[in-house]
Image (cartoon, grey):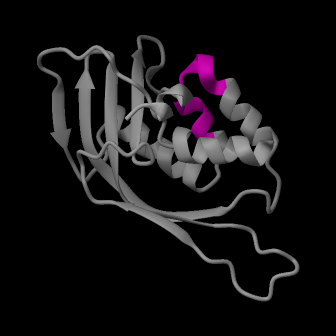
Amino acid sequence: MTALLTGALLVTGVIACGDRTSVSKSPVSRSSNVADSGSGRVALEYMRAIARGDFKAAIPLVAPSQRAILEAVALGQGPGTLPAVTGEVSLGEVVEDGDSATVSILGKMCRTGPASAKSTSAPVADCVENHDPKTHSPVFVVHLAKDKKTGWNVVLNFGATDQP
């Protein structure tokens, strides 16, 4: 069960899918290859922490009301239970609209499952790449909300994965 939840987190929540239904007439959009001091920095920091399996670093970046989800996943993890995730990622496009933001991540991420004790062959890496800063891929998009007290926070919305 923990592996299933972790898989869902890595595919849908790692990059925190969400549905932003209200869009103002003039959102702020910028593309950058360096992390900024706002939503883009938080999104990139979150992505890198999850990719290295560092839930302690990722949890404070999530909206306070949703941190328990990530804490539950982290409690169920032990040595060799998660696939190894590697990659090189950078900031893509940052679109801020009031107190919400959508950030795309560029680069490549690979996961390699733990080797079976019975297997004689090396584990094979499964990789995904994104070079499009305007991507809609849930694997490479982070949604955030701005809170007056805590600033920008990643918003986990697992229900959004069923949407186009």
Residue drawn at (58%, 47%), measured in percent from left and top? 10
Q: Quadrant of the C terminus?
A: top left
Work out which quarter of the rendered image holds the N terminus and state it. top right
State left or right for residue 57 relative to residue 72.
left
Q: Position of residue 36 (x, y in %)?
A: 29, 40
Residue found at the far right of this picture: 118
In depth, the one of 41 and 75 nearer the eye is 75
Where 104 falls versus 131 (above or below)? Answer: above
Q: Quadrant of residue 119?
A: bottom right
Residue 42: horizontal and vertical position, in percent? 42, 37
Q: Nearer the viewer, residue 79 or 125?
A: 125
Queried whether the magenta region covers residue 61, the answer comes back as yes
| Range of magenta residues | 57-67
Is residue 38 visible in this depiction of the protein? no
Q: Quadrant of residue 117?
A: bottom right
Q: Is residue 65 left or right of residue 151?
A: right
Residue 117 seen in the current view: yes
Q: Is residue 134 left or right of residue 35?
A: left
Q: For this rendering, which residue is in front, 94 or 123?
A: 123
* Residue at far top of view: 148
- Front residue of 54/93: it is 93
Image spot of residue 110 (x, y percent): 52, 66
Q: Is residue 94 magenta?
A: no
Which residue appears at 68% of the width and 45% of the height? 6
The correct choice, above or below, for 36 with respect to 132 in the image is above
Q: Residue at x 55, y 68 (%)?
A: 126
> To which quarter of the image does residue 163 belong?
top left
Q: How many numbered circles are shown?
A: 0
